[in-house]
């Protein structure tokens, strides 16, 4: 029986940037890969920056990473350093609290293996990054309304 094939990285990094309110997410990844013969992992980086005002804190920042692939003969999966599969429901990267103007980076690994030996197929992998966080404003940046009480 033939060995299974695996995906290996190729080419340089690409960065996609997403901004929403006080958070900016940069995904630094390899946009191209090719078939290889031994297990390996591809490392991608997620960088989160607090772009809110001086008194805006991002609390308990997490990023859920989930993979989808269009391959019918391949299985893309999140992996540990030894290319072993980890949680198929996605990996959660923890960034903690991020102060105004500060950044934090985390990496994750993924791999892919053929389900059927010696079958070639081109396919795409979608990296779904889902941020989970709280935005905490200081009192000086709070939205203020007043009520006047008469005598």
Image: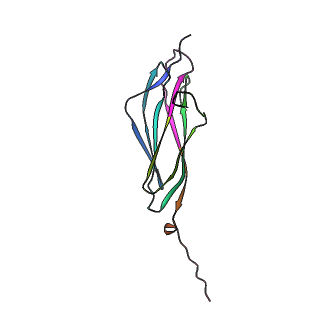
**In the picture shown, does residue 38 fall above or below 76?**
above
Q: Nearer the viewer, residue 1 or 82?
A: 82
Residue 141 magenta: no
Measured along the vertical axis of the image, is residue 9 above or below residue 46? above
Q: How many marks?
A: 0
Q: Dividing the image into 4 quarters, which one contains the N terminus? A: top right
Q: Residue most toward the top?
A: 1
Q: Quadrant of the C terminus?
A: bottom right
Q: How is the image coloured?
A: rainbow
Q: Residue at x 53, y 26 (%)?
A: 71
Indicate the position of residue 40 as horizontal and vertical percent values. 48, 25
Q: Nearer the viewer, residue 133 or 84?
A: 84
For this orientation, the residue located farthest to the bottom is: 151
The reply to whether residue 121 is visible in this rendering is no
Q: Nearer the viewer, residue 119 or 10?
A: 10
The image position of residue 125, as x and y in percent, is 50, 32
Using the image as rendered, state which of residue 119 and residue 28 is in the foreground. 28
Q: Position of residue 52 (x, y in %)?
A: 45, 58
Q: Is residue 110 magenta?
A: yes
Which residue is found at the position 51% from the left and 35% from the top? 126
Q: Name the residue: 56% across, 77% down.
A: 146
Q: Is residue 80 left or right of residue 151?
A: left
Q: Which residues are magenta?
A: 109-129
Is any atom of residue 89 visible in this view? yes
* Residue 88 drawn at (x, y percent): 60, 33
In the figure, 13 relative to 95: above or below? above
For the point 58% across and 32% down, the residue is 86
Up-down relation of residue 134 to residue 122 (above or below): below
């Amino acid at each position: 029986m033939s060995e299974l094939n695996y995906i290996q990285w190729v080419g340089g990094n690409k960065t996609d940037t997403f901004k929403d309110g006080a958070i900016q997410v940069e995904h630094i990844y390899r946009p191209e890969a090719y078939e290889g013969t031994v297990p390996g992992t591809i490392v991608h980086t997620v960088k989160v920056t607090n772009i809110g005002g001086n008194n805006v804190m991002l609390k308990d920042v997490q990023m859920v990473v989930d993979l989808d692939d269009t391959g019918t003969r391949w299985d893309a999966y999140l992996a540990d350093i030894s290319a072993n599969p980890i949680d198929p429901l996605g990996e959660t990267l923890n960034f903690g609290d991020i102060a105004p103007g500060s950044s934090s980076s985390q990496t994750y690994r993924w791999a892919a293996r053929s389900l059927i030996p010696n079958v070639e197929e081109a396919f795409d992998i979608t990296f779904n990054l889902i941020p989970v966080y709280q935005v905490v404003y200081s009192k000086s940046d709070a939205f203020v309304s007043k009520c006047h009480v008469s005598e």
